[in-house]
Image (cartoon, rainbow, N blue to C red):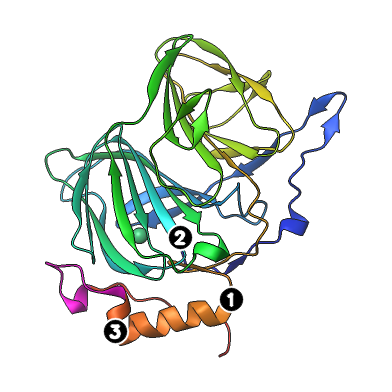
Amino acid sequence: MSNLIKDASASSSLDCPVVDGRRQVQHVPAREAEVGGIPIHRVLPSRQRRLVGAWCFLDHAGPAVFKGDSRGMQVGPHPHIGLQTFTWMIAGEVLHRDSLGSEQVIRPGQVNLMTAGRGISHTEQSLPDDPQLHAAQLWIALPHAHRDTAPRFDHYPDLPSWQEAGATLTLLVGEFAGRQAPTLSFSPLVGVDLAAERDAALTLPLVPAFEYALLPLEGEPTLEGEALAVDELAYLGRGRDAMELALPAGARVLLIGGEPLGEEVLIWWNFVGHSKAEIAEAQREWEAGGERFGRVASFSFEERLMPPPLPWKG
Ligand code: MN
């Protein structure tokens, strides 16, 4: 993440227009990038859409099978501030280590959540026993009032999961359809994985005050008759109390949503902040190797990932 993104809520409306009685969907294509040796599709942030609730970053990694000498995803020590990193694993196994001493393998059906708050550093590595990867990696911006919260790491191996009309729904965070996920969050938001074992037609309840988006991960879902494409975010905006979603057998889609954050968010490299000064200070401290971001045991100081120079003066 090397581009500076400033949330321009004014230029990206939270309310999709209604045309001929139908609320329009904004289609936001992903761009290709690479993380730790793995090609990914980066969906958020983009020029057309910066935030969905507090969700400020969304990478779709895989599905990929590692061949030859590939060791899969290998991301060395790097810092974060002002966000929660959120990993939803669909296939493969990744080992997370951080400067708090956490060491946790994440497996399919599980969420890893790292709350960076005022500062943490971590590593992520595919494990050789399962040479594949399919995952969604997201960041959740911490609201200004919580930006300096103490860093922590949480692993969620058991999330609410249920069957509905031929699909398996898993609640990753927040409340949905009368269920509640255990996942720690600092603003009202929701994340749901929907995977169809057979052709499924679903009516899903929504909260009108939330904005929502769908990201097809596999197959070709249809939203109220409109085909959606893999790795193209379908932004639904606010003001809906339900949606009709059709999933052909084998399709999988990620639903994210939340109360509009209502704050300006700056993203630079692995930092999320509310001011350039805050981000510049974090970058200086990481470059200097100070105490703020700690150390990930079993990695050397030299293996740290370093940011590009700040894109502004000062
Ligand atoms: Mn990270």
Q: Which SS class for mark 3?
A: loop
Alpha carbons under labels 2 and 3: distance apart: 20 Å
Measured as percent of width and height from the top left, residue 195 is found at 42, 22
Disc 1 packing (10 Å; few <14; some 14–19; many ≥20): few
Give the residue at x 13% y 45%: 128
Q: Which of these two is toward me, 34 or 211?
A: 211
Picture quadrant where residue 306 is located = bottom left
Q: Which SS class for mark 2?
A: strand
302 within the magenta span: yes
Earlier along the polypeptide chain: callout 1 or callout 2? 2
Alpha carbons under labels 1 and 2: distance apart: 14 Å
Q: Which SS class for mark 1?
A: loop
Question: Label 2 is placed on what type of residue?
Answer: Leu
Instruction: Tell me which segment is drawn in magenta.
Output: 293-303
Residue 20 shows up from this direction: yes
Q: Is residue 4 above or below residue 96?
A: below
Question: Is residue 159 rendered to the left or right of residue 100?
Answer: right
Label 1 sits on residue = 275
